[in-house]
Image: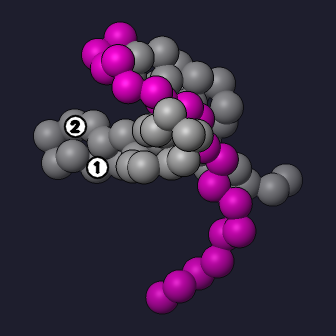
Amino acid sequence: MEKELYVLGVFDDDGNLIEFVRKGRNWSISGYDSIGSARRGLAHSKTYSKRNIKIVKATGFEAVE
């Protein structure tokens, strides 16, 4: 089974990704291992933010170090 990873991104009015949603005390980017958990994270994020937030699927997994 191929692994999946999702993150939440903030998009501008033109549909361009401008930043990732950061959460928590250490202001880290949250990753989700299923689309269901990403949807729950999205619902939670929209409660506290009026920005245009969407789920982004990470692709092209490559070890860099």
Residue drawn at x 71%, y 68% as measured from the top left: 60
- In the rendered view, does 65 fall on the left or right side of 19? right
- Which residue is identified by label 1? 28
x and y, in percent, of residue 29 in the image: 36, 48
Tag 2–tag 1 contact (CB < 8 Å): yes
Give the answer, above or below, for where 58 lies relative to 22.
below
Name the residue nearer the viewer: 29 or 3.
29
The span shown in magenta is 47-65
Residue drawn at x 48%, y 15% as measured from the top left: 43
Name the residue nearer the viewer: 38 or 33.
38
Residue 63 falls inside the magenta stretch:
yes
- Which residue is identified by label 2? 24
SS state under label 2: loop
Name, please, the residue furthest toward the bottom.
Answer: 65
Residue drawn at x 56%, y 40% as measured from the top left: 14
How crowded is the residue under tag 1: few (<14 C-alpha within 10 Å), some, or many (20+)? Answer: few
Q: How far, Cα to Cα, is label 2 from label 1? A: 7 Å
